[in-house]
């Protein structure tokens, strides 16, 4: 994203925009959590390895380890594209998996991390939608 550009999120997603000086002083993890937890259908629970986890249904979107890093799962192809584009790095514990890790040390990394959570959210929403019913052809009567 270009410096100074306003991120655009799909549908009803919003970005964290501090409205007061006290919000501006909140840590990156809290800013990300405020945004991701505001999306429809997202639940927030403690993560089994520490931090907080975001999920849609039973599907984990990813989790935060405080203000330091975010870990997100993607199919291997998507993971490889994110790493090649410099948007993430291999997971800090499981580098050969589909998981990625993102450092969240400042405002630019907060926006980048929210964008990756948005990508995971879109994938989860698509997976939850039932396949459209298609009309089956009727056998010939004759």
Image (cartoon, rainbow, N blue to C red):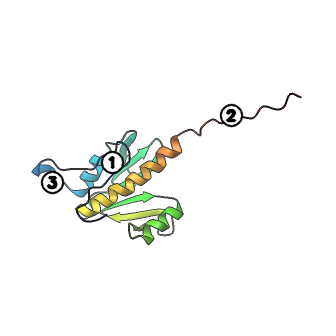
Percent position (x, y) of residue 74? 48, 58
Q: Residue at x 36, y 45 (%)?
A: 45
Q: Residue at x 28, y 59 (%)?
A: 110
Callout 2 touching callout 3 (CB < 8 Å): no
Residue 36 disc label = 1
Callout 2 touching callout 1 (CB < 8 Å): no
Q: Residue furthest top?
A: 141
Q: Is residue 123 above or below residue 70?
A: above
Q: Is residue 69 above or below residue 59?
A: below
Q: Which residue is mark 2?
A: 135
Q: Residue at x 24, y 52 (%)?
A: 31
**Of residues 53 and 138, the one drawn nearer to the viewer in this rendering:** 138
Give the mark toward the camera: 2 or 1.
2
* SS state under label 3: helix
Q: Residues within 10 Å of mark 2 (few under 14, many from 20)?
A: few
**In the image, is 12 to the left or to the right of 16?**
right
Q: Residue at x 53, y 64 (%)?
A: 77
Q: Which residue is mark 3?
A: 24
* SS state under label 2: loop
Q: Residue furthest right?
A: 142
Spatial separation of the CA atoms under disc 1 and disc 3:
17 Å
Percent position (x, y) of residue 63? 37, 54
* SS state under label 1: helix
């Amino acid at each position: 994203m270009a410096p100074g550009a306003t991120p655009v999120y799909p549908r009803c997603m919003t970005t964290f925009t501090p409205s007061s000086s006290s919000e501006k002083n909140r840590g990156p993890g809290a800013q990300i959590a405020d945004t991701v937890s505001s999306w429809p259908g997202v639940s927030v629970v403690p993560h089994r390895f520490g931090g907080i986890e975001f999920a849609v249904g039973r599907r984990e979107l990813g989790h935060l380890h405080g203000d330091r890093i975010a870990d997100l799962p993607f199919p291997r192809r998507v993971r490889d594209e994110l790493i090649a584009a410099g948007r993430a790095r291999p997971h800090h514990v499981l580098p050969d998996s589909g998981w990625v890790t993102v450092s969240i040390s400042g405002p630019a990394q907060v926006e980048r991390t929210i964008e990756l959570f948005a990508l995971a959210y879109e994938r989860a929403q698509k997976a939850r939608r039932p396949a459209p019913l298609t009309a089956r052809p009727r056998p010939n009567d004759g």
